[in-house]
């Protein structure tokens, strides 16, 4: 290969650096402007900014899923329960396409199987079965009833769409142009309904609706974006607080009433999303794996004082208290 001239390589590298630096610019600029306003009002040196910490890594697949043993029943045994209308369902699950179906489709299958088994057991069909087949039906119904909560959990936490929502390949939200997250909220609400109605005979699942809602979650890594937004806000307010604390005793300057008005909508979006995510996780009738419990408490919790949401609330209150110690320029 012919090596590129050095000046060409430099241009390529420079362009790459510029492009890489643009990723968080829209989210960062509002904080840059606010810091500059503070330094201008107080006649102090520029506030030194540092990168916020990284968000936590989403638990590995093996850490966030439940191990569900495969149920093996001979076709003759299944055929003996044909009046329960489960033979075609199981045959479809066992064919080549059924075995490679995504977790969401496996969820639909397991729920439909439970519905048919439960309805069958609570009908007069068992009265016409042999003792062995009746016992087999009872055992299979009980097993699928026990497994369904874990199946529901795995269907969500094993889905590519859910995992991508927590991706570290993400950036903070643009505080000036916040995204409309209605579709994502509707999607999470639908998943929550599926979980809370998993043992309902009346609530009917919809395959296309489920896939469309999962697709909505895949549009952007929203959970990660929200967490990065909270960490960025916490970092920038902490830096502003340090500047105000070091200036208060020596400064006679006043502060303009310019507390970031755009922070409130950012908090509203963050609160909406974290509330929805926590509701979905807590809706499951099963204790989450330890790794997920730790992640939820450390990053998603709205109550843990050390989680991003409460950390931001604390540093924001401290910031407002520090601002109140300065004279307002409007009063002069």
Image (cartoon, rainbow, N blue to C red):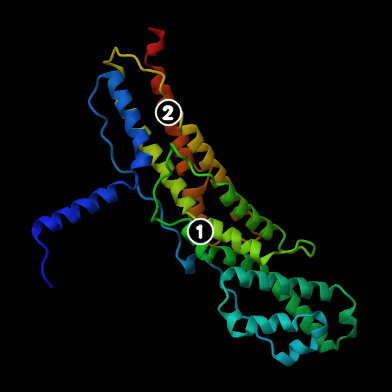
- Which tag, 2 or 1, sits closer to the chain's start? 1
Quarter of the view holding residue 281: bottom right
Q: Is residue 232 above or below residue 160?
A: above
Query: Which quadrant: the N terminus?
Result: bottom left
314 relative position to 30: left or right: right
| Pointer 2 local density, CA inside 10 Å: few below 14, some 14–19, many at least 20 | few
Q: How many marks?
A: 2
Residue 12 locus on image (x, y percent): 19, 56
Q: Is residue 78 visible?
A: yes
Per the image, label 1 sits on a secondary structure element best described as loop
Residue at 32%, 33% in the rendered image: 32
Residue closest to the far left: 6
Q: Residue at x 70, y 75 (%)?
A: 143
Q: Which residue is mark 2?
A: 260
Foreground mark, 2 or 1, reads 1
**Farthest top residue in view:** 332
Point out residue 4 in the picture as x, y percentages from the top left corner.
12, 63
Q: CA distance from mark 2 to mark 1?
A: 31 Å
Residue 220 in the image: state x and y as whole percent.
47, 54
Q: Position of residue 188 (x, y in %)?
A: 60, 54
Q: Which is nearer the eye, 199 or 87?
A: 87
Kindly state the secondary structure of the residue where label 2 is placed. loop
Left or right: where 46 falls relative to 326: left
**On screen, residue 116 above or below 237:** below
Residue position for label 1: 218
Q: Neighbour class for label 1 at 10 Å: few (<14), some, many (≥20)? A: some
Q: Which residue is at a point 74% across and 84% down the rendered structure image?
A: 87
Residue, x 38% and y 56% (percent of image)?
A: 169
Foreground residue among 175 and 44: 175
Q: Is residue 298 visible?
A: no
Q: Which mark is residue 95?
A: none
Q: Residue furthest bottom?
A: 76
């Amino acid at each position: 290969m012919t090596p590129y001239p050095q000046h060409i390589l430099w241009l390529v590298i420079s362009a790459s650096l510029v492009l890489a630096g643009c990723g968080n610019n829209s989210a960062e600029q509002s904080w840059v402007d606010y810091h500059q306003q503070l330094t201008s009002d107080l006649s102090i040196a520029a506030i030194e900014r540092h990168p916020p910490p990284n968000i936590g890594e989403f638990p590995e697949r093996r850490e966030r899923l439940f191990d569900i043993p495969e149920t093996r029943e001979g076709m003759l045994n299944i055929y003996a329960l044909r009046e329960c209308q489960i033979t075609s369902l199981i045959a479809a699950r066992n064919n080549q396409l059924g075995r490679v179906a995504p977790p969401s489709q496996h969820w639909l299958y397991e729920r439909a199987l439970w519905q048919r088994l439960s309805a069958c057991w609570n009908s007069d069909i068992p009265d016409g079965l042999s003792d062995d087949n009746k016992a087999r039906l009872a055992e299979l119904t009980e097993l699928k009833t026990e497994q369904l909560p874990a199946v529901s959990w795995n269907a969500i936490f094993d889905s590519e769409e859910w995992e991508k929502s927590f991706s570290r390949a993400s950036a903070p939200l643009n505080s000036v142009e916040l995204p409309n997250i209605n579709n994502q909220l509707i999607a999470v609400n639908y998943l929550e309904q599926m979980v809370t109605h998993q043992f309902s005979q009346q609530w009917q699942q919809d395959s296309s609706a489920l896939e469309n809602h999962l697709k909505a979650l895949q549009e952007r890594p929203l959970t990660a974006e929200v967490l990065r937004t909270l960490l960025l806000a916490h970092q920038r307010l902490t830096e502003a607080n340090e500047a105000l604390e070091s200036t208060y005793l020596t400064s006679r300057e006043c502060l303009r009433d310019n507390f970031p008005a755009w922070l409130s909508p950012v908090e509203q979006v963050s609160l909406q999303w974290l509330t929805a995510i926590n509701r979905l996780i807590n809706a499951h009738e099963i204790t989450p794996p330890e790794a997920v419990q730790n992640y939820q408490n450390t990053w998603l919790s709205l109550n843990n004082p050390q989680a991003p949401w409460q950390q931001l609330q604390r540093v924001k209150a401290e910031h407002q208290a520090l601002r109140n110690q300065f004279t307002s320029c409007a009063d002069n």
